[in-house]
């Protein structure tokens, strides 16, 4: 029987799936056949179902946190279905700081390593001791060290070699007892008293001022990645656009702010059906309702074309897009 997916992804496009299987116990994974199309889902805050999905949605809902105190840190072994922000709040309450810059990021703990969630100068990888996953081919649980996860900016092995092969079951985080605040991001530099709690509160305040609550106004956070461009292109762009925010990436590349590019291209408030470039943060697309996957595709392509024509930068969507039976990518195609 078809089941609506609208409440299962925060962009909330109308869509249905053939079957939804909620995993509350890992033994359930052993019983699944994985022979028809399947999609692993947490809270759907980085996934958009563009149309009806002809397969099984496997929603990870396992819970549990085990804390092991070691000489220099606390090791937290957290089940995939736990909510990320609740975990951050819980660690602070327990006097185990470290995760405060990553407060209020929606979604599950199990999805966090997939794109190596990051915000306000910190990425998840900094704390990863290991990630455990259920290997679909062998039905074994396998542990990867932080290095084996191949983390990068919004990247990990789970988006590449292990895509559709691994169900993350547990994330182990090491939180050092010696706390070192990360205050490089603008609004955090203005803090008068620096404690993990004040950083946590400032991050929440900053996020609430720009990012719409997905449960009030449907959205999937930053829709595009901040592009990483060659230094040569950056130099050329800075002549025309001296204000372009840019950050060192490596010797040959800088990261530039996609939200700035989109805003300067005059696209804030641009609307197709109920989908709009958010007024407070141009990197976020919001869905006011009455929209379909085809409207979103038109919006993505329009933004990509405008940004390519203006800056010769090809924007890649960060959000995972699902069509009727698999993940898909919308790109510039022949334009780039
Ligand atoms: P889902 O959308 O359910 O899944 C995301 C991807 O991970 C899918 O491809 C899915 O197949 C895969 N996946 C999920 N669970 C598992 C599992 N157990 N095993 C294997 N694969 C799995 N992200 C940031 O990095 N930084 C931010 O600051 C940030 N801010 C956001 C703000 C808003 C308002 C919103 C809506 C999103 C934001 N995001 C941010 C994106 C999102 O919160 C993260 O990507 C989050 O980790 C997604 O969690 P989820 O459980 O909702 O994942
Ligand atoms: N900017 C504009 N106009 C806009 C949006 C941004 O000029 O409409 C400028 C800002 O003034 C700032 C720069 O662009 O100079 C960067 O903006 P911001 O600090 O808001 O962050 P971002 O680069 O747009 C990234 C992440 C967010 C994360 C924040 C905070 C990506 C794709 N996005 O956004 O992550 O929370 O930094 O660290 O890397 C997400 O992944 O879903 C997400 C929300």
Image: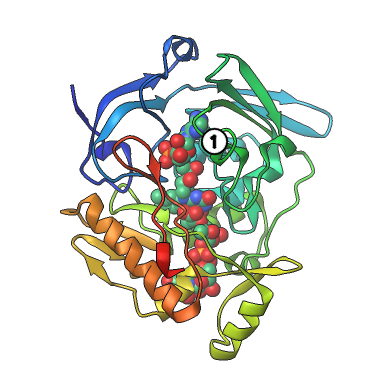
In the rendered image, the residue lying farthest to the left is 290
Question: Is residue 30 or residue 8 the one in the foreground?
Answer: 30
Q: Residue at x 36, y 68 (%)?
A: 303
> Label 1, on which residue?
87
- Percent across and percent down for residue 233 are 61, 78
Q: Residue at x 15, y 54 (%)?
A: 290
In the rendered image, the residue lying farthest to the bottom is 239
- Percent across and percent down for residue 281 are 41, 67
Q: Residue at x 68, y 42 (%)?
A: 150
For the question of whether residue 287 can be seen, the reply is no
Quadrant in the rendering for residue 124: top right
Depicted 75 relative to depicted 88: above or below: above
For the question of whether residue 333 can be seen, the reply is yes
Quadrant in the rendering for residue 158: top right
Quadrant in the rendering for residue 116: top right
From the image, which quarter does the N terminus lie in? top left
Question: Is residue 175 or residue 196 the one in the foreground?
Answer: 175
- Percent across and percent down for residue 212 are 36, 57
Q: Secondary structure at mark 1?
A: helix
Q: Residue at x 47, y 21 (%)?
A: 62
Question: Is residue 16 or residue 193 the one in the foreground?
Answer: 16
- Horizontal side, residue 104 vs residue 252: left or right: left
Depicted 284 relative to depicted 46: above or below: below
Q: Say few, some or many: other residues with alpha carbon within 10 Å of mark 1 (under 14 / 14 to 19 / 20 or more).
A: some
């Amino acid at each position: 029987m078809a089941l609506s997916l609208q409440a299962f992804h925060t962009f909330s496009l109308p869509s249905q799936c053939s079957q939804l299987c909620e995993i509350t116990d890992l033994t359930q994974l052993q019983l699944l056949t994985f022979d028809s199309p399947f999609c692993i889902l947490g809270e759907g805050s980085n996934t958009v179902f563009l149309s009806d999905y002809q397969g099984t949605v496997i929603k990870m809902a396992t819970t549990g946190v085990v804390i092991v105190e070691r000489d220099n840190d606390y090791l937290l072994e957290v089940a995939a279905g736990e909510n990320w922000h609740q975990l951050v709040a819980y660690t602070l309450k327990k006097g185990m700081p470290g995760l405060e810059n990553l407060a209020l990021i929606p979604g599950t703990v199990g999805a966090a390593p997939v794109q190596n969630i990051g915000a306000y100068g910190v990425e998840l990888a900094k704390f990863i001791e290991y990630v455990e996953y259920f290997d679909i081919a062998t039905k074994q649980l396998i542990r990867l060290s932080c290095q084996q996860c191949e983390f990068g900016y919004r990247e990990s092995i789970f988006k590449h070699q292990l895509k559709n092969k691994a169900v993350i079951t547990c994330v182990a985080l090491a939180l050092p007892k010696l706390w070192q605040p990360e205050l490089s991001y603008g609004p955090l530099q203005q803090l008068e008293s620096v404690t993990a709690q004040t950083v946590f509160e400032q991050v929440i305040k900053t996020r609430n001022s720009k990012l719409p609550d997905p449960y009030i106004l449907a959205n999937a956070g930053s829709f595009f990645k901040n592009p990483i461009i060659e230094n040569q292109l950056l130099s050329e762009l800075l002549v025309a656009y001296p204000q372009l925010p840019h950050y060192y990436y490596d010797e040959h590349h800088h990261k530039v702010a996609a939200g700035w590019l989109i805003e300067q291209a005059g696209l804030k408030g641009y609307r197709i059906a109920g989908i709009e470039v958010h007024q407070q943060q141009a990197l976020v697309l919001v869905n006011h309702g009455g929209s379909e996957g085809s409207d979103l595709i038109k919006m993505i392509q329009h933004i990509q074309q405008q940004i390519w024509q203006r800056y010769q930068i090809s924007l890649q969507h960060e959000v995972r897009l699902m069509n009727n039976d698999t993940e898909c990518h919308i790109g510039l195609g022949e334009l780039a």
